[in-house]
Image (spheres, rainbow, N blue to C red):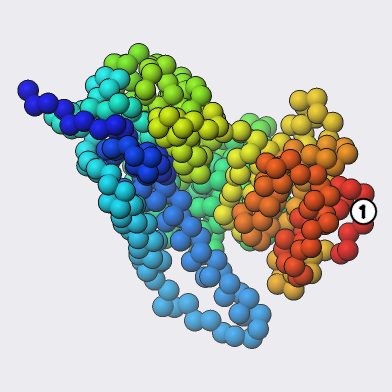
Amino acid sequence: MTSPEKFDVAIIGSGPGGYVAAVCCARRGKSVAIIERDRLGGVCLNMGCIPSKSLIRSASLFRSRTALAAMGLAVDCSGFDYKRVFAASRAAADTLSKGVAYLMKKNGITVINGVGVIASGRSVMVDGSREIGAGAIIIATGSRPRELPGFPFDGERVLSSEDALMLRKLPKKIIVLGGGAIGVEMGFIMNSFGVEVHLVEALPRLLPLEDADAAETLRRSFVKRGIAVYPATRAVALTKDAGGVSVTLEDAEGVRTPISADCLLVAVGRTPNTDAIGLDRIGIAPDRGFIPAGDYGETACPGVYAIGDVVATPLLAHVASREGEIAAAHIAGQPGEKRIDPLEIPAAVYCEPEVASFGLTKERAEAGGIACKASTFHFRAAGKAVATGETEGFVRIVHDREGSGILGAHIIGAHATELIHELLLAKRQKLPLTAIASMIHAHPTMGEGIMEAARLGLGEGSQG
């Protein structure tokens, strides 16, 4: 029997968690093998974050033709070819995947193409025949789109988010099940390109985890743009034929309504890829598919770590990356923080208007017995927003009553996903509102909204 190849660290999966962990381990002097069944970069770079943001950018540009019309310009869209939009999104994904390959080579990381299955707490079998021995194993196998019972994916009429990203031709009409981040982003893309969109959410509002007023602002914006939004509504039946799909919707009162469309996009969350990876061989039993992990991401099997979408932390690329850094430092004997503070994880939704947040909403803080205030500055009073016609939305800071500590922040509006970080830094550094309120912000900028919200929290009037 051939002796196993030996490394200090073996990593299964090369997404934002896996490849970051690999680089961090290698830069600490560890020999690393990373095992990937598909393309380097995982779902995020190849079938998620990156191609979707390329599509969103193209959608925004296409939608901006209405602004040009307001200047008296006639825009001829007869030559529009969505295949070129799709090609640009794939080019972006390919560029970044190649970038990960370069990082692996630069840091001396061995890349093994194949399906990795844990054989023991110190070895991984690749494609059932190649044994990789390791002092530590990191499981970073990611997740896949979750199927809804009764609405199985077929790649043509019933689409997963990955199927939707791979469309080379736009439908005329689409039903989107799921009003979370993926659903609203895909709804925005489709609507911007002229597709008739019906967006269905089982819970009472879009983006159920976000601030309620932010969610309502987004709903109103979507409706204004022609997206039909169905909150507190479930899909209860599906029929398919050569012409498309028919979905029966049921609202909170039990009223049923059939809707026909060319296709159905099911965007109701993701499922961790933890089945058939050998967890039973090392005594690990997943909980609802997630791997139980303790400090530094270490599992009940010493030396085996789990990061990213396979653990029950937010399924976000930046969370996976940070968890990879934490695990790598521990493996190298240089432990830092034990785990991520869930109240310091930024969430970002890239539709228009953008939505970003971290920490507590006022409602959650009060439900937890925390006395707090929510100070809100609306962009309609910001000079830059008025000048650029981007007045939708607001900045909301949730803080203690004295203004000495930030508990959370919620932004909806143009560039929200960039603006959120000033407030997150202030929270991490335990800065009071005065630190933000007294700092000079360039004028005119959208960032002035953060300063103004902080000043409102201190009882000071807005400059408008």
Position of residue 280 measured from the top left corner of the image (x, y, whole percent): 32, 16
Quarter of the image for residue 307 reads top left
- Residue at the far left: name it: 1
**Mark 1 = which residue?**
460
| Residue placed most toward the observer, 260 or 394 | 394
Q: Is residue 126 above or below residue 207?
A: above
| Residue placed most toward the observer, 173 or 216 | 216
Left or right of 404: which side holds 313? Answer: left
Residue at 24% from the left image edge and 24% from the top image edge: 123
Q: Is residue 462 above or below residue 25?
A: below
Q: Quadrant of the N terminus?
A: top left
Position of residue 257 measured from the top left corner of the image (x, y, whole percent): 57, 41
Which residue type carries mark 1? Glu
Q: Is residue 108 above or below residue 222?
A: above
Position of residue 272 measured from the top left corner of the image (x, y, whole percent): 41, 31
At mark 1, the secondary structure is: loop
Q: Is residue 320 visible?
A: no
- Residue at the far top: name it: 283
